[in-house]
Image: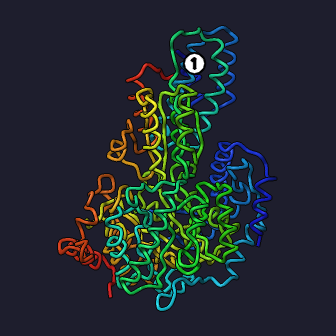
Amino acid sequence: MIPLTDFERRSLTGPVMEEQEFDMSFAKKVREVVKRYPIKFDREQIIADDESADGVFEGGVDLLAEVGMYNRDTQRVIQLTRDEVVQIATDVWEGPREVTFGRGKEEVAITYRTAEDPRTPTIWMSTGGIPSTEELYIPYVQSFLQEELCQGTGDTPILSVGGLENKSETPAELVCADTEIKLRMEVARRVGKPGAYLGNSSATSPQAVIATCFEGGLDRYNAMIPIHLMPELKLNWGRLVLGMFLEQRGMVPWISASSIMGALCRNPEETAVAQIASLLAQLGYGHGTIARVAGSGLDGVASHRETMGICSLSARASERHVGVPMGAWSLSVAGAGTEMAFYEKAAQTVTMVASGATWLSTMGCRKGVGANLTSGLEGRLVAETAIAVSGMKTAETNELIKKIHATYADQLGSPPQGKTFPELYDVKEVQPTPEYLDVYKRAKDQLATLGVPYR
Amino acid sequence: MELVQEIAQAVSDLDNEKAESLVNDSLAEGVDAKLVLDGVMVGITQVGHRYETGEYYMLELMQAGVLGKKLIKEITPHLPKVEGVKPAKVVIGSTKGDNHDIGKNLIITQLQVSGYEVFDLGVDVPSITFVNKAKELEADIIGMSAFMSTTMSHFSEVINHLKDIGVRDQYKIIVGGGTTDTAFAESIGADGTATDAVEVVKLCHRLIAESEAVIA
């Protein structure tokens, strides 16, 4: 294991480079390493095959070893040897491959899964960064956490508190983050899950993030704290400061590999290789025990075949060679309250369960643009779908994904906008309206017809 | 016209050696520098088209930007001075607390290859820096990028500051990022937003057409 302080040393001694030069070297190298291995994204077989997954892993190792990471604050490249990169993966593989969150009856062990693994992933339900207004915050979060299959929630930013706008790097950032945590704890108590995983707050500056971590606030059992690299392979002192803080306090870093297709990476193959390089880099300095892949294109669509393919390639590469409990999201282009949003989330869920995902967090609708745009009912369908398809054979899964994708593919360019949370839920009773339940039932029936074996 | 096409093709194909040789030889032979420049600009425009059609990616845009900048530097001393013409300047960055820059960098490259003078303030940029740099550089457009709801909040801080010091009308303000849409941009008093880098260039063209600045 390379000590985090060594990443500091390398940040100060690595080659000096202009940021654009680093970007260009990354873009050239990712094209080059993809050609070295038999990596293939097949639009007809979304779940990555073993050979491609192995190639993505090897390509990711090569990419990180040959490009390194970029520290923007020193404008230097943090270099790693290939042996060091391989050792990062080996350390995780030989480690526990399990991490526990929650307290009491809400304690959940998140354990490494493989493709076709019959065990169901852990289900956390949250907006995943899609904000809420203050007056709706409690019912909004409650709509997720009260779901029977929900084993924890996650980050749901609050837009303002008492008229104070949530703004990074200001005192309001801390006020809002603190309020989010307190309100989520209140919701957890209300729904009888007081020990549940709560997720990180909306605070992003290191000082505010650190200030939210204390006994009675965010801690080892109820939160992961983001330390992830920015695409592609870039960090700053803030990331390393947070990494060191978490290590000293025994907290769990949130590692998210989120390379983007259409910019420095051209296609699913290159993007997946970049994801693995990013994953290994973060495991390297963060010494994490859990991670997530989040594939997306410049268009922000997470539910087309290519982005699902990216996630499958990188999740399967990790499953076969890293062994870190790997998570995934489901983000729809369509608005909540539409059948299409359910189908998009189902397709992503099936893809990731069949690619070895260990935990799923439901995410927002309408690409996450706007406030109060999702609800717990989408989480319910994600959870039910995940349970239904766990253990399904890959060939069967590939056919199912294609059928589900076909239900919405022609609407991705002009998706239905749907409705907001207060239009979809009785916010006083925190229950979906009969109309919204009908949409959910129709979508679930259709998915069952397509081959999702709901229990 | 043949020379213009030849230079354009070399630039469009990112054939640095050929493009540089054609430009330098032409200038040495006394060919009208405006014609040589036309060749470079047509080539850069073609690179933009090749990006739009999916043939080229961000790497090619960056390479074209580097090549174009180098060639224009060679050509500029040979061009007649035009009085009263001010090239369009864009000051751009990711707001305070936001370290996302892929989209921003893509826009910068597209704007550069489209003839804009772009000043990249980088990421995690304090709101006051947008204001001060725009004033210092006499920018025409201020571009702000933010990916998170907590960093989008800085957009209005910059706009309000410009209003409070009485210079809001001197700048066109564009905002963007993963969670920005037209309704939000309008609600904070920005002049526009766009969904991708190509659209941002069109937006800037439209905004610049409303001002006295010109695209190089």
Q: Quadrant of residue B20?
A: top right
Q: Quadrant of residue A51?
A: bottom right
- Extreme residue in the bottom direction: A105
Residue to which mark 1 is pinned: B37
Q: Where B85 sits versus A317, above or below? A: above
Any part of residue A325 in sight: yes
Horizontal side, residue A419 vs residue A113: left or right: left
Q: Where A159 sits versus B67, above or below? A: below
Count of labels in the image: 1
Q: Where A68 sits versus B195, above or below? A: below
Horizontal side, residue A106 vs residue B27: left or right: left
Q: Where A117 sits versus B38, above or below? A: below
Nearest the viewer among B179 and B20 is B179
Quick one: SS at disc 1? helix
Q: Quadrant of residue B191?
A: top left
Chain letter of disc 1 in the image: B
Q: Crowding at label 1, few (<14), some or many (≥20) Cα neighbours within 10 Å?
A: many
Nearest the viewer among A172 and A16 is A172
Q: Residue at x 35, y 68 (%)?
A: A137
The amino acid pointed to by label 1 is Leu
Q: Give the colour scheme of this rendering.
A: rainbow
Residue B168 location, x and y as percent?
42, 31
Q: Residue at x 55, y 63 (%)?
A: A40
Residue A335 location, x and y as percent?
30, 61
